[in-house]
Image (cartoon, rainbow, N blue to C red):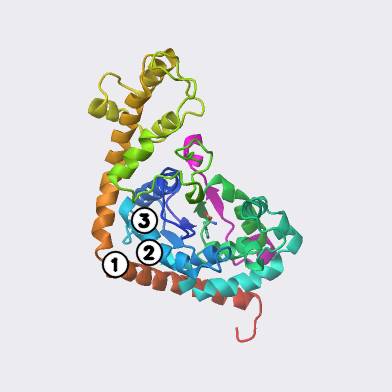
Amino acid sequence: MNNMNNVILTGDRPTGRLHIGHYVGSLRKRVELQDSGSFDRMFVMIADTQALTDNFDNPDKVRQNIEQVALDYLSVGLDPSKVTIFVQSMIPELTELTFYYMNLVTVSRLNRNPTVKAEIQMRNFDSSIPAGFLCYPVSQTADITAFKANLVPVGEDQLPVLEQCREIVKKFNDTYGDVLIEPKAILPDSEICKRLPGTDGNAKMSKSLGNCIYLSDSEDDIKKKIMSMFTDPLHIHADDPGHLEGNTVFIYLDAFCEDHHFAEFLPDYSNLDELKDHYCRGGLKDVTVKLFLNDILQSVLNPIRRKRLYLEKNMAYIHDILKSGSEAARSIASETLYEVKKAMHLYGY
Ligand code: TRP
């Protein structure tokens, strides 16, 4: 990635605290990007407006989770002096851009978006789909283009939303002149990081399934969750040969374990391949592997939790960060809005 003219923007819907799936899927990478310095500007947005598109009847949940997500961000090491952290609803320019972009997309195209379609099915909306929800890819296009972001780190499930964003950008530029930038997605590096399964082995880690390990979980909760994790139903006695496929404990090790963890916590082995070999041969107890995973996760999550507990005592600081980040973001979005309205020959420009 070259240094110049890279504007990175990404975001999360504040519908719950963030968990270790978010950590390996995006947060860890964001901190790495932040510290790489290979960009001109990096924005991280708390997408409360988007969260309301399917939680319009639960505004308190969204409101409360703005703070929780902000705490999670700072606890994992996002640094407000390097990254602009802001709240979507504090930038009214985004709503105005959304309305102008709405003309550049057809209802049938919105209906065909595979991500939105899957989400509609998951939420059992049937025929009562809020128009705002169907249009969230248009609003996400506003989020991205308002900051002229060219790089958007997202999960694989968001690719169709980015594709739709690029279509809207092309249509805008063709119709009104070159103002907007077509963004590219940055995907997680490895397969495991794309989607960490739940502790019960379910493909998705989700609050409603109760199978998450949260960044804010206590040490005891983490241990309990790990000790009751799904492993290999064929590995009944320690001597039975074990299987790695679909074995959640080993999937988590793939995501978190580094060679130095062996020296620290399990010096009988020197790397994960050796441990896996022994498990597959037979003779290695599940509980040994679980305790090892517990040691690793505690060592990763302890400093995050400690920082969170410290920050929680000073919520005024969190609010200041969100306020100043949103002010800085708003001044950029309003410049883009100005260019957009001018290009569209709107009255007064
Ligand atoms: N839709 C994204 C998600 O659910 C969140 C989001 C909103 C976002 N606006 C964005 C992501 C802009 C990247 C860029 O994960």
User: Going by the image, does 38 lie left or right of 58?
Assistant: left
Q: Is residue 178 magenta?
A: yes
Q: Quadrant of the C terminus?
A: bottom right
- Closest to the observer: 48 or 161? 48
Residue 72: % across, % down: 36, 55
Task: Describe residue 291's horizontal placement relative to residue 121 as left or right.
Answer: left
Residue 26, how many percent across, how many down?
Answer: 44, 48
How busy is the neighbourhood of tag 3: few (under 14 within 10 Å), some, or many (20 plus)? many
Q: Secondary structure at mark 2?
A: helix
Image-based side of 92 in relation to 129, left or right: left
- Choose the circle earlier in sequence order: 1 or 2: 2
Q: Is residue 228 above or below residue 144?
A: above
Q: Residue furthest bottom?
A: 348
Please give the residue where the numbered disc 1 appears in the rendered image: 315
Instruction: Point out the tag, 2 or 3, that comes first from the N-terminus.
Output: 2
Residue 57 in magenta stretch: no
Comparing labels 2 and 3, the label whose residue is closer to the camera: 2
Dot 1 crowding, Cα within 10 Å, few <14, some 14–19, many 20+: few
Q: Which residue is mark 3?
A: 73
- Marks 1 & 2, CB-CB < 8 Å contact: yes
Q: Which residues are magenta?
A: 169-194
**Picture coordinates of residue 315 (x, y %)?**
29, 67
Residue type pointed to by label 2: Glu
Q: Is residue 258 visible?
A: no
Tell me the tag on residue 67.
Answer: 2
